[in-house]
Image (cartoon, rainbow, N blue to C red):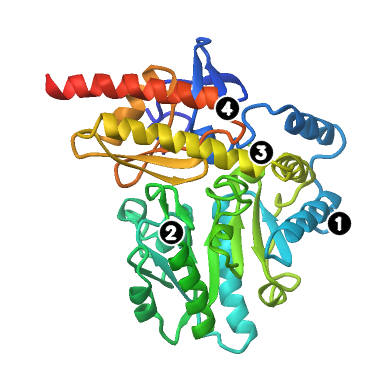
Amino acid sequence: MIPAVMPTYARYDVAFDHGEGAYLWDTENRRYLDFGAGIAVAGLGHCHPHLVEAIREQAGKLMHTSNLYHIGGQTTLADRLVANTFADAVFFSNSGGEAVEMGIKMMRRYHWHHGNPERYRVITVQGAFHGRSLACIAAGKQEKHLTGFGPETDGFDQVAFDNLNELKSAIGPETAGILVEPVQGEGGIRPMSDEYMQGLRATADEFGLLLMFDEVQCGVGRTGKLYAHEWSGIAPDILASAKGLGGGFPIAAALANERVAEAMTAGSHGSTYGGNPLAMAAGNAVLDVVLKPGFMENVQARGDELKAGLEKLVAKYPTLLESARGRGLMVGLKCSAKILNGDLVAKAMAHGLLSVPAGDNVVRFVPPMVITSEQINEAVSILDTALSELSSDSTD
């Protein structure tokens, strides 16, 4: 008999009861150091007191009202995002996939608005993950996500990762824009070079395209900048944000500059729950913390420590590990062909460390951004133990 919860996940045999900071406790009261953070969601750690209090206070006043009316928290959060990013306007929704869908719609709407409705195609890059909707899986073009959901939604062309010449050759009269993740998460923690990012901006300008960044996973301070594209010194036309923006509460945002946003007139898009008062309270509380002086610098410093610790493990276990890569507190360990990333994730979990598998045989580490040096050392020590055991297993 099928379980009541649809079996779309291959779940680990554990359930968590409560959390605090960088730690989770399961229903058997065993403690885990959480370097997955709900896949880069719990950026402030679990049950951050400021976030908890903001949600509690708002829940006692008003949780939901329709977008037919003004919602004060939306204006506050939108103003803060506009003040701290490239954007001139924001649309709020509930998940990263929704924000990406909104961005794709804005690309098409922009060209329609300017008399070019034939321009609807979007160029993406190999290894991409943009969500689970029909359009998003077509954008990602990963067979494991497309299987069984045909026919594939039209409108997307994919080129090699970090290859500007191939991207330029894919541009045609129907091309509307370019969609990339500045740091691929599901694809295996693959940061795009600053030179490539700058080339994307120049190419978009040259061919009259819109440039969109999917920063659902790498945004909201994760790399040591509010948004990861800032490292390359350029700005997109559209950006999708989610995950860390709510610190654990469902929220997403599609950010756009004025020339794109002006095409989105009344009735062109909507969301029943998007921008509800409770979500806005969460988003504003997260920004209260993330925008504090010194927060980003701390993320950068802790990220450097984490990467350095992982690089020492690469040197110690050269037959099991190939490299450590990433930016800020979004770091991956690429495993060699001798082990599967899932084996290392499971072995580390058995010793009390949570991490997340990613593509390219990579183990992903996206801990809370309030992580301490001591907790990083604890994580590296657990990984050392796990790798030692895997090394012994491989030689038996």
Precedes in sequence: disc 3 or disc 1:
1
Precedes in sequence: disc 2 or disc 3:
2
The reply to whether the C-beta atoms of the residues labelled 2 and 1 are less than 8 Å apart is: no
Instruction: Assess disc 1: are there few (<14), some (14-19) or many (≥20) residues with their C-alpha within 10 Å of its C-alpha.
Output: few
Instruction: Assess disc 3: are there few (<14), some (14-19) or many (≥20) residues with their C-alpha within 10 Å of its C-alpha.
Output: many
Toward the bottom, the furthest residue is 115
Question: Residue 66: in sight, yes or no?
Answer: no
Precedes in sequence: disc 1 or disc 4:
1
Q: CA distance from mark 3 to mark 1?
A: 21 Å
Q: Nearer the viewer, mark 1 or mark 4?
A: 4
Residue 107: percent from the left, percent from the top?
57, 73
Reading the image, the residue beneath label 4 is 372
**Above or below, 169 relative to 82:** below
The reply to whether the C-beta atoms of the residues labelled 1 and 4 are less than 8 Å apart is: no
The reply to whether the C-beta atoms of the residues labelled 3 and 1 are less than 8 Å apart is: no
Q: Nearer the viewer, mark 3 or mark 1?
A: 3
Amino acid carrying label 1: it is His
Q: CA distance from mark 2 to mark 3?
A: 28 Å
Q: CA distance from mark 3 to mark 4?
A: 23 Å
Precedes in sequence: disc 2 or disc 4:
2
Give the secondary structure at mark 2: loop
As drawn, is 166 to the left or to the right of 272?
left
Residue 212: percent from the left, percent from the top?
54, 67
Which numbered circle lies on residue 249?
3
Precedes in sequence: disc 2 or disc 1:
1
Q: Residue at x 31, y 55 (%)?
A: 143
Reading the image, the residue beneath label 2 is 192
Amino acid carrying label 2: it is Met
